[in-house]
Amino acid sequence: MSEIIYPPGCRPITEDLGPDELIRRLKTLAHTLQAMGQDEGAYQQYIPLALHLAEEQFLSHPSRDVQLLIACCIADVLRVYAPEAPYKDTDQVKTIFLFLITQLSGLKDPKDAAFKRYFYLLENLAYVKSFNMCFDLEDSQEIFCALFHLMFKIVNDEHSRELKVLC
């Protein structure tokens, strides 16, 4: 695998960091990725970073906050690189989208302190139409069934009209 290059101001994201330091670094990275525009070819050096963020140790991290920040980073990677996501392995794409769906379950409680970040994740995925890349997968039905099942299960009267439209 290629050397992992981080955007300016971002520090390495490694599994051996303590949860607090990992969260601090992920917040910086998430903020940096959020500010990036779609500039075709300009971010090729960050593809190894994008692949690193989708590794199992981060997707299954015990911290809910780490998982949410990883999901937001991946969603921004999908936005920045659209329409050509850096994730090419079909098993990895399936794993990533099932992970993102799991993260979207955080939308169930609008009073949750992390709700704004969960909403950002949904808004980003919807705006970019990130789930469209799942249509080419053999297991696309499993992914879309999980997504629709989740949305029908969690959306309720406490949610804003804006959230309901996105879902």
Image (cartoon, rainbow, N blue to C red):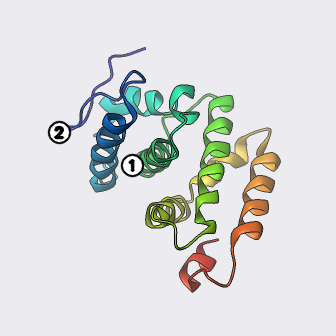
> In the rendered image, which residue does mark 1 sit on?
80
Amino acid at pointer 2: Gly
159 above or below 123? below
Relative to 141, is 160 on the left or the right?
Answer: left
Relative to 125, is 45 on the left or the right?
Answer: left
Image coordinates of residue 161 in percent, x first then y, are 58, 85
Relative to 69, is 143 on the left or the right?
Answer: right
Quadrant containing the N terminus is top left
Residue at image coords 50%, 32%: 58
Q: Secondary structure at mark 2?
A: loop
Q: Residue furthest left?
A: 9
Mark 2 vs mark 1: which is more N-terminal? 2
* Distance in Å between CA atoms under marks 2 and 1: 18 Å
Q: Residues within 10 Å of mark 2 (few under 14, many from 20)?
A: few
Q: Secondary structure at mark 1?
A: helix
Between disc 2 and disc 1, the foreground one is 2
Question: 64 and 88: which one is in front?
Answer: 64
93 above or below 79? above
Residue at image coords 71%, 43%: 136
Image coordinates of residue 71 in percent, x first then y, are 50, 47
Amino acid at pointer 1: Val
> In the rendered image, which residue does mark 2 sit on?
9
Image coordinates of residue 164 in percent, x first then y, are 63, 78
Residue at image coords 77%, 53%: 146
